[in-house]
Image (tube, helix red, strand yellow):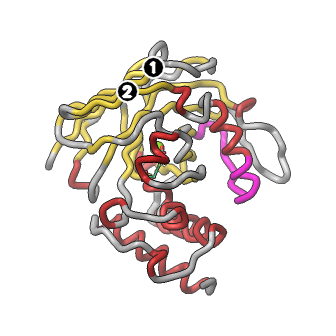
Amino acid sequence: MSLPAELDALAHRLDQAQVHRTDTLSLAEEADIDVDQAYAIQALLVGLREQRGEKVVGAKLGFTSKAKMAQMGVSEVIVGRLTDAMRFSDGDDVDLSRFIHPKIEPEVAYRLSRDVGNDGDTTSIADSVDAVAPAVEIIDSRYRDFKFTYTDVVADNTSAAGFAIGAWKPVQQVDNRAVRLSVGGNEAVGSTSAILGDPVRALHALDRVCRQRRITLRAGDVILAGAATAALPLTPGIAHCEVAGLGTVTLKGVRS
Ligand code: OOG
Ligand code: MG
């Protein structure tokens, strides 16, 4: 399966699922998609969002922790794109009816201070970040019951649906920090070291994927390093995340 028209049709199918908040079945059940094609579908899908006026404001990594790999049954790092339509401010209400079956997870965010990845540029991302912050990511797989293969989730822009960032601090070592996420009566507890041993390694992994997939990043872009714990269902009420020594970030789930 490789015809551009077929890849385009799959991108539209995932886009419609997001726009109309209706889940869809795994693409892998019907089409034999390889990783290159999955990233091609993702690029088309993000392009559809850009055609609606959304702007790409960063990148995210997924499956950088064993907790997430175990929860979802995928064990290789994935990369997706973040747009301005996914951005919430710390403390915002989040209308849960915008999503199919949202989950929330605790993350560490980095901010890029210069452009990376243009024209054979070999500057490392880790050397190009100037700030770090606690963050949460809202994931909302477009696949029924969050059931997907590796290529499915790459095609679906890695379930990206929302994010919020706490106060930025000058970039510093953030390994071995306790992480706590509470939402509803549920709690997830972990450590930033769950993210590839040190969240900075997520930036090295992103270097490799960006080079391979010709992804360019711009000054000011946000990078989510991947969840330190398994995700929790995002339910009505306060979702609160704390990364020790780095700060907190809060969202409030509401039903409109
Ligand atoms: C895929 C997204 C994974 C992370 O932080 O590991 C991810 C999913 O679990 O639906 O964002
Ligand atoms: Mg995540």
User: How far is mark 1 from mark 2, CA to CA?
Assistant: 8 Å
Q: Which type of secondary structure does the marked residue at label 2 adopt?
A: strand
1 relative position to 142: left or right: right
Q: Marks 2 and 1: in contact by CB < 8 Å?
A: yes
- Label 2 Cα neighbours within 10 Å, binned few <14 / some 14-19 / many ≥20: some
Measured from the top left, where is residue 120 in percent x and y? 85, 51
- Amino acid type of disc 2? Val
Q: Nearer the viewer, residue 249 or 33?
A: 33
- Label 1 Cα neighbours within 10 Å, binned few <14 / some 14-19 / many ≥20: some
Residue with the mark numbered 2: 189
Looking at the image, which residue is at 63% across and 38% down? Answer: 202
216 relative position to 188: left or right: right
186 relative position to 203: left or right: left
Measured from the top left, where is residue 211 in percent x and y? 76, 53
Residue 5 vs 52, above or below: the answer is below
Marking on residue 178: 1
* Magenta highlight range: 208-221
Measured from the top left, where is residue 133 in percent x and y? 50, 25
Looking at the image, which residue is at 23% across and 47% down? Answer: 95
Q: Does the magenta run of residues contain 220? A: yes
Q: Nearer the viewer, residue 218 or 136?
A: 136
Looking at the image, which residue is at 27% across and 59% down? Answer: 100
Residue that sits furthest to the top in the current view: 245
